[in-house]
Image (cartoon, rainbow, N blue to C red):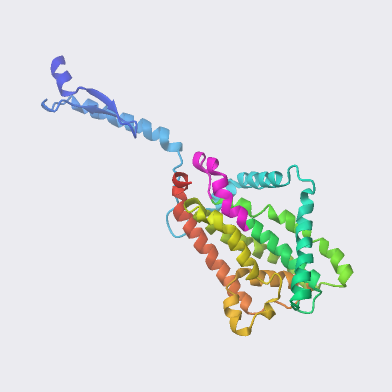
C-alpha cells in the first residue's frame, strides 16, 4: 500500500506566485481516495495564504465614477504636510535672502514691467498706478507658475517614494502647490507700503481675498496634476514646462488689463483660467474693475480641467511605478 501511495501522490510543490502548496501525481497512476488528503492540504495552504495577504493593500486605482477617496487623502494628510515642509526647507536652505526672495522677485519684475510696458509701450492699467497694478499681477503669477512647475516635477522627483511605498499618489502634486502660499503671504503685506506711496485704498472687496487665493490654488493644482501624470510617461513635459510657463505669462493679464483685449477676442481669452484670477485679485486688493461675466467661463474651464486631470491621473497612476 505504501508503494501504491507513493506512485499515486508523489508529493507537494508550492506555487511560485500564490505560495499555495499543491500535490502533484504520477500521471500513470490510477486515481485513489488518498488524493483527497492532498486536496485538503492544498485548501489549508490556500487559507493560510489568504489570512496572510488579508492585510495587504493592492496598489490599483479605484473603480467606479467617483474614484476620489477623500477619507484616504485625509488619513495621509501628515505625509502631505511632510512633503510640503521638506520643499520649503530645501528651497530656502543656505539662502542669504531666504524668504526675502518672495518680495525681491516681484519688485524686480515691477521695475522692468514699468519701464517696458508703461514707459515704452504706454500700456493702460485701468486707472490704477502701474507699479501697484503690475505688482499684484506678478505676485499672483509668481505663485501660480512656481506651483505648476513644482507639481509637474513632483512625481519624478519622488520616484523612490512612489515605487516603494503605498500612499495616495494624488498627495504628491497636491503637496507641491501649498509651499508657494508662504511666498504669496509674505508678498501681499508689501502692498501696504505701496498703498501709502501711490495713495491706493482698497474697498470692501478685500474681504473676498481668501476666495481668490483658493481659486489660484485650484488652477495651479488642476494644471500641475495633469502635467505631473504626463511627465511620468513623457519626459518632454519636463523640458517644455519653462516654455509653456513663459507663453502662459504673455497670454495672461499680468502686464496689461483684460480690458485691453478686443471685445471680439474676449470669449476666447476667457478660456485662460488665470484671466479671471488675476483680475479678481486686482479688484479685491486695488479696487479695480470687478470681474465681468466672462469670469464664469474661466471658472467653468477650471472645473472641467480639474475633472479631466483627476480622471487621467487616476487612470494612469497604477503604471507610475513601472514607467517612472
Q: Determine whether 320 is above or below 135 in the image.
A: above
Q: Magenta segment: does it hold 83? A: no
Magenta: main secondary structure equals helix
The furthest residue to the front: 120
Image position of 236 (left or right of 38): right
| Residue occupying image coordinates x 13% and y 28% | 27
| Residue occupying image coordinates x 62% and y 84% | 263
| Residue occupying image coordinates x 79% and y 49% | 97
Can residue 169 be seen in this snapshot?
yes
Quadrant, the N terminus: top left
Q: Position of residue 79 (x, y in %)?
A: 61, 44
Q: Position of residue 67 (x, y in %)?
A: 48, 56
Comparing 116 with 40, the one in front is 116
| Residue occupying image coordinates x 80% and y 76% | 128
Image-quadrant location for residue 289? bottom right
The number of numbered badges drawn on the structure is: 0
Span shown in magenta = 148-169
Image-quadrant location for residue 293? bottom right
Q: Magenta segment: does it hold 162? A: yes
Image position of 278 (left or right of 304): right
Amino acid at each position: 500500500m505504501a508503494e501504491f501511495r507513493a506512485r499515486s501522490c508523489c508529493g507537494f510543490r508550492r506555487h511560485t506566485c500564490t505560495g499555495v502548496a499543491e500535490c502533484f501525481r504520477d500521471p500513470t497512476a490510477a486515481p485513489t481516495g488518498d488524493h483527497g488528503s492532498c486536496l485538503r492540504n492544498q485548501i489549508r495552504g490556500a487559507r493560510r495564504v489568504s489570512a496572510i495577504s488579508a492585510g495587504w493593500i493592492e496598489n490599483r486605482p479605484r473603480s467606479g465614477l467617483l474614484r476620489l477617496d477623500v477619507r484616504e487623502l485625509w488619513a495621509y494628510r501628515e505625509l502631505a504636510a511632510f512633503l510640503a515642509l521638506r520643499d520649503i526647507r530645501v528651497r530656502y536652505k543656505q539662502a542669504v535672502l531666504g524668504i526675502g526672495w518672495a518680495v525681491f522677485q516681484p519688485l524686480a519684475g515691477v521695475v522692468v514691467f514699468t519701464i517696458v510696458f508703461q514707459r515704452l509701450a504706454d500700456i493702460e492699467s485701468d486707472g490704477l498706478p502701474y507699479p501697484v497694478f503690475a505688482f499684484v499681477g506678478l505676485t499672483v503669477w509668481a505663485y501660480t507658475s512656481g506651483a505648476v512647475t513644482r507639481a509637474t516635477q513632483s512625481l519624478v522627483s519622488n520616484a523612490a517614494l512612489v515605487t516603494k511605498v503605498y500612499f495616495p499618489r494624488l498627495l504628491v502634486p497636491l503637496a507641491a502647490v501649498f509651499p508657494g502660499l508662504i511666498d504669496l503671504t509674505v508678498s501681499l503685506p508689501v502692498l501696504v507700503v505701496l498703498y501709502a506711496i501711490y495713495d491706493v485704498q482698497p474697498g470692501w472687496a478685500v474681504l473676498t481675498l481668501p476666495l481668490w487665493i483658493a481659486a489660484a490654488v485650484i488652477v495651479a493644482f488642476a494644471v500641475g496634476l495633469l502635467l505631473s501624470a504626463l511627465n511620468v510617461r513623457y519626459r518632454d513635459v519636463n523640458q517644455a514646462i519653462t516654455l509653456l510657463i513663459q507663453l502662459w505669462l504673455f497670454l495672461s493679464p499680468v502686464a496689461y488689463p483684460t480690458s485691453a483685449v478686443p471685445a471680439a477676442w474676449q470669449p476666447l481669452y476667457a478660456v485662460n483660467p488665470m484671466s479671471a484670477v488675476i483680475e479678481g485679485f486686482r479688484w479685491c486688493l486695488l479696487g479695480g474693475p470687478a470681474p465681468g461675466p466672462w469670469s464664469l467661463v474661466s471658472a467653468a474651464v477650471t472645473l472641467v480641467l480639474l475633472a479631466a486631470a483627476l480622471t487621467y491621473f487616476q487612470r494612469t497612476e497604477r503604471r507610475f511605478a513601472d514607467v517612472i
